[in-house]
Image (tube, helix red, strand yellow):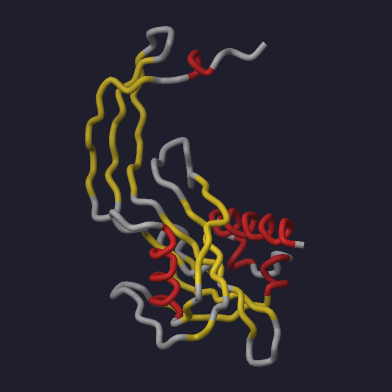
Amino acid sequence: MLPPDSDLRWHIRRREPLLERAIFTVYAHHCVDSQGVEAQFSVLDSSSWVHTIAPCLDNHGQECLVMVRQHRHGSESIILEFPGGVVADNEEPQPAGARELLEESGYGAERYSIIGVTNPNPAMMTNKLYTLLAHNVTLRGQPAPDANERLAIELVPCQDIFNLRRQDFCEHALMLSSLLWYKRYLATQG
């Protein structure tokens, strides 16, 4: 027999900020469980994120996804990603996804729908990752990335992503999560 959820839950007695940065705060959560055991856990409190999956046709009529390549400091490598970024305070995911797609790639869409929501790492992070689908994607202008973003825009054939042919994409677990939401979405449309 499985224990009830109340036996599994830790209750926060006190939150202590340890490190504050522009995009996150690290807290120590001083907790107690249902048996009275006390422990401390590190929690990263961050704004939510958004990935925008933007399907379009390339100049040869091939189905592609608008993607960006950029340097990631954690892995010290160039990673292929869906355009995305931080959902600003008091911003909804769809406008955030539209803004990030346009800023990073110059592409835009008629509308955006949420096709999945996950927690990037529930063991220690408070935020959510929203996966959006852009509908009727077209090139709208030149990219306007943030000052510290160095991006290369790439139209990647859908099959290269669906079949995991790009190692520079497969290295990023959150990209695989968003891809799973997209595949699930496509399966429900057929």
Where does residue 139 sit, x and y in percent of width and height? 50, 86
Q: Nearer the viewer, residue 94 or 87?
A: 94
Nearest the viewer among 58 and 176 is 58
Q: Position of residue 55 (x, y in %)?
A: 61, 74
The image quadrant that residue 49 belongs to is bottom left
Quadrant of residue 146 within the rendered picture: bottom left
- Position of residue 135 measured from the top left corner of the image (x, y, whole percent): 56, 72
Count of numbered circles in the view:
0
From this viewpoint, which residue is outermost toward the right? Answer: 190
Farthest residue toward the bottom? 59
Looking at the image, residue 81 lies above or below residue 23 = below
Q: Give me the residue at 31% from left, 72% from top.
A: 148
Relative placement, left or right, of 17 versus 176 is left
- Residue sticking out furthest to the top: 35
Q: Which residue is at a point 48% across and 44% down the rendered structure image?
A: 119
Locate the C terminus and report the quarter of the image it occupies.
Answer: bottom right
Residue 151, compared with residue 117, is above or below; it is: below
Q: Which image quarter is the N terminus in?
A: top right
Q: Residue at x 40, y 87 (%)?
A: 142
Location of residue 122 with respect to 61 vertically, above or below: above
Q: Position of residue 111 (x, y in %)?
A: 50, 70
Give me the residue at 35% from left, 34% from top: 42
Left or right? Give the position of 165 relative to 19.
right
